[in-house]
């Protein structure tokens, strides 16, 4: 093993060893099937850092079988393709059975807890496709690819994206678009909805098999807990609360936090109509299909909690008592608050916690809300503030139309910095390590998508590489940190993918 869980062993793709712990679950958990071939596929993009997670050498990207394997046209003999069943609550309403409507698992690559499921998304119809066509479009596949890799760069738990393979075949969305297959990696794609599935079908045996599998494989420390299922719910609740805090702290909005899109491992999964906050608005809704704003930015933490309740209810037959379920969920708000507080202190370069910090932080969000300042640029420019030099504030003041409003808050902030003897240089370094310069702004993704739609794929990799190191200055790439152009106001992202 090398750093960051990357596998030192490099495999040829054809000899990539796959294991099948999920496929070894009873047949009720999935349907075995073959991907539907994609006509005349071509490689759109592939991520070397993601390939390293499964011990795959990037030189394999150039082999013709790479494209064929990752669009489902060539099935590796060592794979056991299947689609998993799950259910879920969508927009707060029980939706019944859903399942992998267009995703096909090939198997798991890598060792032990580092093993990654390899999943083709958009590889054709499955028994769970319902009204869908089993396909994904190039646009949404590129967005998922870029955002997975960007979130990894930000240090936020996420599924990863190995590659996107395209075809000129058309699929119908609001308008005809070309089809694509995105290959995703994660230790597991089991969702809250996977547990809800067995609860609502009154199948306690399967519920137990699923919980035991999850504990055994992904939470081995809980095996010997006095009450393992209680401990599992407690731990998933904690991870979910922490994930929500991490999303809020970078301004990430998922867009569709249905329980079938919530990872049992606390990862960000199922990228659809996501967005990064630009002009700050607590009530911002990134998903055009979410008319009620259920998944607006400010709602995410409480929706995370709601989703944990849905999981808790599903785990009730395992845990045995409502009070125990409640106890496992009870720490969510505190877990969230403490994590967010720590992240915000780091974002503001505060080494200590002091009594009035909440006032300072509340005032900051009120300022951001009143002025709709750009989220990412605000925090990044704040890194350069000098404690005794208000004249150094020009770049950040320029973000505000109401400059006196910023000055008033900045003077409060400076006083607070003085109270802990903050040193400019040291604070700047610490703040730059947690406040990204680069995030996947919608317009940046859109430029890469439009170029890709005319067969120029270069911008996807340019962007991926910049976003892999979002905290580095990368002066040659400063244009990727720019405010969105006017045309970006017209961009809408919806559930259509
Ligand atoms: P999502 O909110 O995108 O995660 O999808 C919700 C459900 O719809 C999941 O069960 C997906 O597999 C399914 N789904 C979405 N789009 C399609 C499609 N084009 N074909 C088949 N199933 C789909
Ligand atoms: Mg989903």
Image (tube, rainbow, N blue to C red):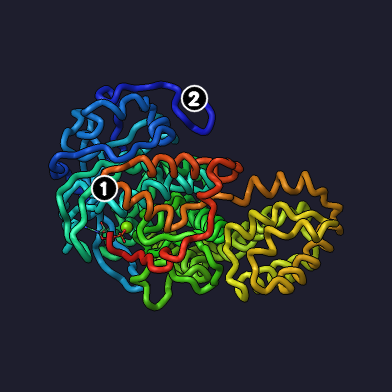
| Quarter location, residue 140 | bottom left
Q: Are marks 2 and 1 in contact (CB under 8 Å)?
A: no
Residue at image position (28%, 63%) is: 496
The correct choice, above or below, for 422 with respect to 11 in the image is below
Residue named by callout 2: 1
Horizontal and vertical percent position of residue 109 = 34, 32
Q: Residue furthest bottom?
A: 292
Between discs 2 and 1, the one toward the N terminus: 2
214 to the left or right of 138: right
Residue at image position (41%, 21%) is: 9
On the question of residue 262 being in view, the answer is yes
Is 398 in front, or is 351? Answer: 398
Residue named by callout 1: 454
Is 325 in front, or is 375? Answer: 375
Residue at image position (57%, 41%) is: 474
| Secondary structure type for disc 1 | loop
Figure label count: 2
| Quarter location, residue 238 | bottom right
Mark 2 neighbour class, 10 Å CA radius: few under 14, some 14 to 19, many 20 or more: few
On the question of residue 241 being in view, the answer is no
Residue at image position (31%, 39%) is: 118
The correct choice, above or below, for 99 with respect to 363 in the image is above
């Amino acid at each position: 093993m090398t750093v960051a869980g990357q596998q030192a062993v490099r495999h040829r793709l054809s000899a990539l060893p796959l294991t099948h712990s999920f496929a070894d679950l009873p047949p009720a958990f999935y349907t075995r099937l073959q991907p539907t071939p994609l006509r005349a596929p071509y490689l759109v993009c592939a991520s070397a850092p993601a390939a390293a997670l499964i011990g795959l050498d990037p030189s394999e990207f150039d082999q013709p079988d790479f494209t064929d394997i990752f669009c489902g046209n060539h099935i590796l003999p060592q794979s056991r393709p299947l689609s998993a069943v799950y259910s879920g609550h969508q927009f707060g309403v029980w939706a019944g059975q859903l399942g992998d409507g267009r995703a096909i698992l090939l198997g798991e690559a890598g060792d032990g807890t580092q093993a990654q499921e390899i999943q083709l998304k958009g590889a054709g119809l499955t028994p769970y496709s319902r009204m869908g066509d089993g396909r994904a479009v190039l646009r949404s596949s590129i967005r998922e690819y870029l955002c997975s890799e960007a979130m990894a760069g930000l240090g936020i738990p996420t599924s990863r994206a190995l590659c996107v393979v395209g075809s000129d075949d058309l699929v119908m969305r609001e308008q005809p678009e070309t089809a694509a297959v995105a290959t995703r990696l994660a230790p597991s794609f089991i969702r809250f909805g996977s547990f809800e599935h067995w609860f609502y079908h009154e199948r306690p045996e399967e519920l137990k098999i699923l919980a035991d599998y999850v504990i055994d494989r992904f939470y081995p420390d809980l095996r010997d807990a006095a009450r393992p299922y209680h401990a599992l719910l407690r731990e998933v609740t904690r991870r979910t609360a922490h994930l929500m805090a991490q999303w809020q702290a970078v301004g990430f909005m998922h867009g569709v936090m249905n329980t079938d899109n919530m990872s049992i491992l606390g990862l960000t999964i199922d990228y659809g109509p996501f967005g990064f906050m630009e002009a700050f608005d607590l009530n911002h809704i990134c998903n055009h299909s979410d008319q009620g704003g259920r998944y607006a930015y400010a709602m995410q933490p409480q929706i995370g909690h709601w989703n944990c309740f849905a999981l808790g209810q599903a785990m009730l037959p395992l845990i045995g008592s409502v009070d125990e379920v409640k106890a496992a969920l009870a720490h969510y708000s505190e877990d969230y608050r403490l994590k967010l507080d720590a992240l915000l202190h780091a974002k503001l370069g505060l080494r200590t916690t002091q009594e009035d910090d909440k006032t300072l932080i509340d005032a900051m969000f009120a300022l951001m809300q009143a002025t709709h300042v750009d989220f990412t640029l605000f925090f990044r420019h704040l890194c350069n503030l000098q404690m005794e030099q208000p004249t150094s504030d020009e770049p950040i003041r320029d973000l505000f139309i109401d400059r006196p409003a910023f000055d008033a808050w900045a003077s409060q902030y400076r006083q607070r910095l003085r109270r802990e003897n903050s040193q400019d240089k040291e604070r700047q370094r610490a703040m730059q390590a947690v406040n990204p310069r680069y995030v996947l702004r919608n317009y940046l993704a859109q430029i890469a998508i439009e170029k890709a739609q005319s067969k120029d794929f270069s911008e996807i990799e340019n962007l991926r590489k910049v976003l892999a190191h979002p905290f580095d200055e990368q002066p040659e790439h400063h244009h990727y940190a720019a405010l969105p152009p006017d045309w970006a106001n017209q961009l809408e992202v919806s559930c259509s993918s």
